[in-house]
Amino acid sequence: MNVLYASDDKFAGILAASLVSLFENNKQEEELQVFILDDGISPENRERLNEIFSTYGRKSAFLRVNDIEIPDAFISNRWPKVAFIRLFISDILDSSVHRLLYLDCDTIIQAPLAELWRTRLDGNIIAGVRDCLSFRYLENLGMDRKSPYINSGVLLIDLDQYREYHVKERVQRFIKAYAGVIRYPDQDVINAVFEGKIYTLPPQYNTLTLFYDFSYDAMCKYRKPEAYYTRRQIEQAVNSPVIIHFTTSFLSLRPWVENSRHRYKEQFLYYRSLSPWKDMPLWKDNTSGLKKAYVKIYRCVPRKWAVAFSGFLHATAVPVLKKRRNRG
């Protein structure tokens, strides 16, 4: 099994918890190679991370982002170099690596990943869990409104096909045509460029914070997806997640932040306690005053109205304004 993470120095302690959870729940895997895209991890924190690898008898390979060549077309004041670095994995990894599981560092693994790793992609190049977005975002990107749009935090990739897909050229053409409407840099690009080559995974392989913050009906009214998982599938993901992804949400704080009430906060803290970061304090809550005010209002008004208004902003107003600005 080949696993890839990406992290900077700030998130090294978050990555540590994910690594421990990966190793703790996959002890039966004889071959488990982990690659880390290193975007400025300090020597001290790199040494701490290597302590985790040594504890579990696993191999590590740090790949420095600054050593990876990226065409100038991908770099601008709007997006940092690291925003697109994952798109060049076929240039980064040796051709002997045929399949890869990419994990965001803000994930916790709760169960063995062997079944996920063995998933047949049926001729597709990338597999992931659908994100919950309005069809307007997809249409802005030139995609069919019913195409799967996946969250890029957990990706299973057929690298052999990936290398033959001329990714650089396709991405360059896409960015040139749609730069003005891109909201989630690498995620938007991955979905648009690989449209028609994406395999949809069950949601328990990437349970998003959104699943916990909203009921199923409220989530669908808020995000207004064209096609999505069933209520039963989401409930199964919430109750028995394989991979927990601590995505941002305006309604809750991530588990390494003070006063977080995330449903799986204790799981994160447990795995972090098994790492060299066990005594590190939680981050301060730096939520803006405007956001706190919005959340307070959201919680005070009837939930039906709050969801309807938030849904209008996220699913309609934002993508429509993006489209108009791009035309201008």
Image (cartoon, helix red, strand yellow):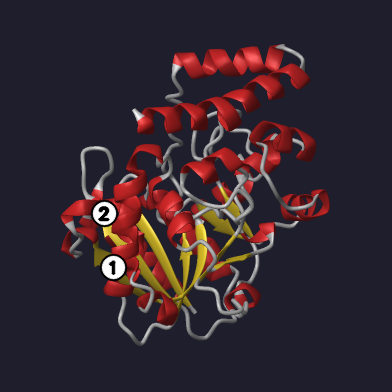
Q: CA distance from mark 1 to mark 2?
A: 10 Å
Q: Which residue is mark 1?
A: 62
Front-lying residue, 323 or 309: 323
- Residue 41's label in the rendered image is 2
- Which residue is pictured at 56% across the width and 38% down the height? 136
Q: Residue furthest front?
A: 327
Q: Is residue 93 left or right of residue 100?
A: left
The answer to whether 314 is drawn above or below residue 114 in the figure is: above
The answer to whether 315 is drawn above or below residue 279 in the figure is: above
Q: Residue furthest right?
A: 232
- What amino acid does circle 1 point to? Phe
Where is residue 123? Give x, y as percent: 56, 79
Dot 2 lies on which element? loop
- What amino acid does circle 2 point to? Ile
Where is residue 284? Give x, y as percent: 43, 28
- Which residue is pictured at 31% across the width and 62% down the height? 37
- Which residue is pictured at 26% across the width and 67% down the height? 63
Where is residue 23? Give x, y as percent: 52, 70
